[in-house]
Amino acid sequence: MAAALLRLDGVCKRFGGLLALDHVSFTAEKGRITALIGPNGAGKTTLFAIISGFVRPSQGSVFYASADITSEPPHARARRGIARTFQLVQPFAELTVQDNIAVGAYLTRPARADASAAAADIARLVGLGSLLDRLPRTLTVSALKRLELARALAIEPRLLLLDEILAGLNPSEIRDIVPIIHDIRDRGITIVLIEHVMQAVMSLAEQVLVLAEGRIIACGPPRTVASDPEVVQAYFGRNTAARMLAQGDPL
Amino acid sequence: MRAIAPVLLVIALLACVPVVTASNLVLNFLVTTLLLALLGQAWNVLGGYGGQYSFGHAAFFGTGAYVSAILQVRFGMNAWLAFGIGIAAGAFVGAVIGALCFRSGLRGSYFALVTLAFAEVLRIIASVAPITGAGVGTLIPLDLRPEAFQFQSRAPFYWIMLAVVAVSLVLVRLLEKSRFGAWLVAVRENEDAASALGIDAFRIKLAAMTISAAIAAAAGGFYAQYFLFVDAGIAYGPRVSVEALLAAIIGGLATVFGPLLGAIAIKTLGELTKLIAGDAPGLDLVVYGAMLIMVVAFAPRGIAGLLTELRDRFGRGVAPVPA
């Protein structure tokens, strides 16, 4: 079994009276793709915000490469090698595609020429090679998602958190981007992704975690999880779930 | 070198002015314009590149002016040394105010209001504290020797002022091309996205504010040395803060030459107003306000942006430049 790069231990998050995350514990293993799925409002994005440092957990700890990073701010975690994309894309509006990516590349390359060259390389890797001089407002949704991915890759992460990188894309755009994610994994980068596109989760993930109402209700390889009665029920409600399982028709 | 070539060209042209004319009126106009250009450049570093709109740059300008004047008058310090310490003191005030504001997460109009409040507090202290000369102000005794940072004619002053403006232009040009500049712009555009990329937004903003304050303090020190008089209203008054941001915004935010262009436009219009309407107090501020509205409405990228647009529209027709 591979070593754990990321480990969450009993993480809780309370927003006033709402318990958004309830004792969440899991590990993401080095060099593998872990998918985090669950119905809307399950707490997936909150969990990502806790891993990347934008939100402090009310309770519990986050370990990265066996160091306790629970109280570190986002920029310190990024410097350790944790990169994230945002569900709603957050490009630097006044900067070109290349300059957007270079902001990340500067982290490991102080010289402008090096950062720009690295940015161009990464742009090509994600299929933005022909759009280097474009401003974000002139890009399609698909290109903006790729820009998010490129910028995150530019800091040379060891752990990449992808928050719904495929949402809003059409099937052919999804087919184009899935091999890129595989390619990133093959470079040895550990990936944790939130995704609603189940077809992509099935083809990408080696481990799937199902979050519902702030708790992890299932964990395992994609096929096993998809036919788990509790998971089907969380998504479709008790009655539909019973009917579907009776028909032998998992997700 | 290629990055700073336009800066050197502009400065070389401006340096020739005293050779052409010895008119005190012209040189006086140019010195005050350069003073404003320097102050505007200070504001541009923090407001233009960093997106932190300060309404209190008088706090730094005034500290530079007062510290260099007081050290000379009350402690008999050499004027050049006092000028240097004034810059350091201004930078220190910038760092303290910046640390307090940014640590408390103040952004946008809250940041603007709190910086205004700091400048006003300093103005009130300066108008009552004995060391600043309170309401009377501080007068630097006449001592027309270069060692005392005072000159017989206006030309040397003009050249020194020009050299400092040149340094500020080169500095901003280098900032644009540096990692620090890229990170500062990233923080301006989106602080969360920037910190997700490993950028310590607090430190970047604090550094920008300290640099900005140092430049503003240099402008203040020059003011004291040129007019040989400082009082609370001149040094810490809101007029300084307003002129700083006007020069930067009218000239073009986050451009190297914006503050210089803005200063020229503002001072020219100010002088014309005086010429036409006489010395009605506050009338130039009315004109500045009208100008600001025009720029915001019709040329949001300022004069520098307007020039780039004109060059793109007409320049390409004449001689197409490969992109």
Image (spheres, rainbow, N blue to C red):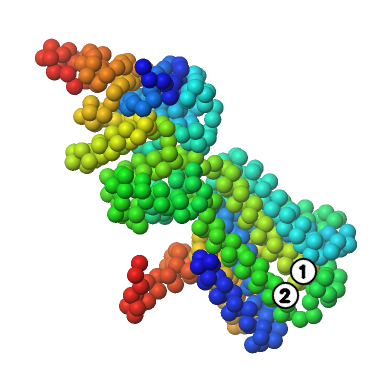
Which residue does the numbered mark 2 point to in the structure image?
B157
Q: Is residue A243 visible?
A: no
Q: Tell whether label 2 touches label 1 (CB within 8 Å).
A: yes
Where B159 falls versus B57 (above or below)?
below
Q: Amino acid at mark 2?
A: Phe
Q: In this rendering, which labeled residue sits more in front, label 1 or label 2?
A: 2
Residue drawn at (11%, 14%) of the image = A247
Q: Residues within 10 Å of mark 1 (few under 14, many from 20)?
A: many
Helix, strand or loop at mark 2? helix
Which residue does the numbered mark 1 point to in the structure image?
B225
Residue drawn at (66%, 60%) of the image = B216
| Letter of the chain that mark 1 sits on in the rendering | B
| Letter of the chain that mark 2 sits on in the rendering | B
Name which quarter of the figure residue B223 lies in.
bottom right
Q: Is residue B162 visible?
A: yes
Task: Determine whether, in the image, residue B192 is placed left or right of residue B130.
Answer: left
